[in-house]
Image (cartoon, rainbow, N blue to C red):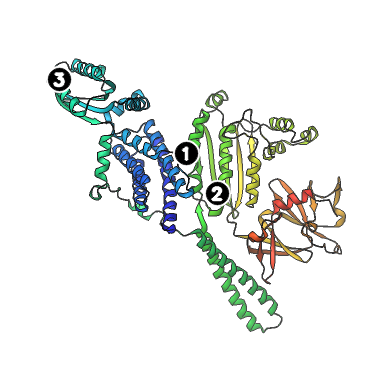
Amino acid sequence: MNSEFKAAFLEELEEQLLLMDNDILKLEQEGESETVVQSLFRIAHTIKGSSAVMGYEEIMRLTHAMENLLERVRNKTLPVTLELIEVLFRTMDGLKHARDQIVLGVPSPVDLPSLIRELNDYSAAPVAAVRSARSQESLPDMRLKVNEAREQGFQVYWIHVQISPDCLIKGARVYLISSRLSEWGEVLLSNPDVEEIDELSSGILEVVYLYSGIQGKSELEASLRDLTDVVRVKVDTYGEQESEEEEQASSPSEQPAPPPASAADKNKNQSVRVNVERLEQLMNLVGELVIDQTRIAQVKRMQKRHLTAESVDELEQVSDHLSRIIGDLQECVMKARMFPIDQLFSRFPRMVRDLARNLGKEVKLVMDGKDTDLDRTLIEEITDPLVHLVRNSLDHGIETPEKRERAGKERKGTLRLRAAHEDNQVIIYVEDDGAGIDPAKMKKAALEKKIITAEEAEQLTEQEAIRLIFRPGFSTAARISDISGRGVGMDIVKSHIEKLNGLIDIETELGKGTRFKIKLPLTLAIIVGLLVKLGKETFIIPMSNIAEIVRVAPEDIQRIKGQPVILLRNQVIPVAWIHERFQIARAEDSKRQIPLVIVGSAEKRLALAVDELLGNQEVVIKSLGSYIGRVPGIAGGTILGNGKVAFILDISGVIQMAGTQEPVL
């Protein structure tokens, strides 16, 4: 099989499954919505067609069965019930497992043939029987009885019996027919019940039975036709009607066509799929252009001393024009890498629904800013941290309905996901209106786990106590659950976000709720950095990590417990030289002022002493490659205008290094 076609199929399948997930949730919330059912039908038809082309027969058969089920919902012959919603969710989960089987090559934990039979059996049930089953909540029991009857060797049939309009006592006649069937076998379900029959009704009365016995279809039909006032009998094997329709539908002339797309659908999301590797290659080429443009600008500055004013002006015009072209090209490529964060947010409605039900909580999920664009790589990298934050809010943040009522709140809690652009960054909020975080409880838990000492606990402010949640091994959970609260996780969330050059902050109010705020760069490919000198080497500090730049006299640097620090606006900030870590000789302290770059990662601040400040520059991040591997404190490298390589500092790594080094001055 062509790997390119397979990749395209899997990408389309992933998109369709996300749409299906959201539509089933809408169907559960809105009930019998024609628009949603139409959309689900179109998705099932799309997956069926593409899987048939690719030769994935079980996926094709499963979506075909789903299509038939939705067709009956669309035609109002099957109602939307909770049982139907669960069947649709199981179908979607089966499709996900089938996708994983294709990708990973591992056996699916779901028996797809059984799932197909379940869909066929469900959609084969007459509408009257299903409506009755909905009111009695008997569908699960009915299927259990059907399976038990089949295991014991009995046949299971749907029996349609029509009573003559001339029958004077229809209820009594139905009672006699039901009694006769009970003598021959077992009536698993009947609709309508005898008590529901209007004796004075005119016209033909049809009664539907679900029956198990040892008779054949012909024998049953003949026996029932002989009964008084019976004008018509039809017997179908349980599930057979659906199989016959599926067989007819397999003919090309009988294939159901998907509903016609509206003009809005045709003009919406017009896009071309581009392989990520090709985008990466294009980005690398743009990066080379940026480097060359920087070199031309440097040559321009150097040649001003030797060339005529006319030639310098010409070079300047060429350089400026090239800068504009490269800037536009860079922006276009960046936008090509951008995707709406809705692709990430759309994974959460189903997860929130299932977790809330498991935890016995009522939760409303609100998602804002779904059209906010973010680099595709970042979308993939931030998924796991967001999943953990959402799970944490559901498990520890939002209370049970009973607790919320006692606290004077609405029974249903609100979990909000929000994204927005701010200062060339993406801000993601995860907030709930739950119980909030108790600083005293945080201190107590940290003391019990010996994460902090009693002396440290006394000195902690409320905000510092709340941020204990990010310490490794910290948990306030009274019990361990499979949702969260295993004592690990929030520290991993924080470190993962910081590796993406991002920051995470937390705001909480006891009894009101908690908000996590995540700041991320728009992309990991190109950054604006500050060029600094350490000895004779040039390093780059990402501007997103720089709080401010100051110059201080050597005597302004003091010591606390052997650690050099400065006092800046009543805040004590540690000072660090990292020359030794990179085996770089420090410059002579001949200058009266020492440049300090105040860098930050989350709540931590560090004054990084450098030898010289060179200015800001936009740089393209290059990986160090597998040969060198990961170097502590280094995020990557770039090529400067003079053709030399400069390393980009990983500020979270630098702060960790500074915390382990011997204080020097």
Q: Which mark is residue 227?
A: 3
Q: As drawn, which residue projects farthest toward the front?
A: 153
Give how far apart the Cα atoms at labels 3 and 2 are.
72 Å
Marks 1 and 2, the one that precedes in the sequence: 1
Q: Which mark is residue 436?
A: none
x and y, in percent, of residue 410 in the image: 52, 28
Label 1, secondary structure: give it. helix
x and y, in percent, of residue 4 in the image: 44, 58
Marks 3 and 1, the one that precedes in the sequence: 3
Q: Residues within 10 Å of mark 1 (few under 14, many from 20)?
A: some
Q: Is residue 52 visible?
A: yes
Give how far apart the Cα atoms at labels 1 and 2 are.
23 Å
x and y, in percent, of residue 284 in the image: 57, 65
Q: Residues within 10 Å of mark 2 (few under 14, many from 20)?
A: some
Give the residue type that dot 2 points to.
Answer: Ala
- Which quadrant would residue 131 be assigned to in this image? top left
Marks 3 and 2, the one that precedes in the sequence: 3
From the image, tell me which residue sits under label 2.
420
From the image, tell me which residue sits under label 1.
350
Label 2, secondary structure: give it. strand
Image side of residue 119 versus residue 432, left or right: left
Give the residue type that dot 1 points to.
Answer: Arg
Label 3, secondary structure: give it. loop
Q: Is residue 362 visible?
A: no
Q: Residue at x 62, y 80 (%)?
A: 313
Q: Do callouts 1 and 2 mark residues in contact (Cβ within 8 Å)?
A: no
Give how far apart the Cα atoms at labels 3 and 1 are.
52 Å
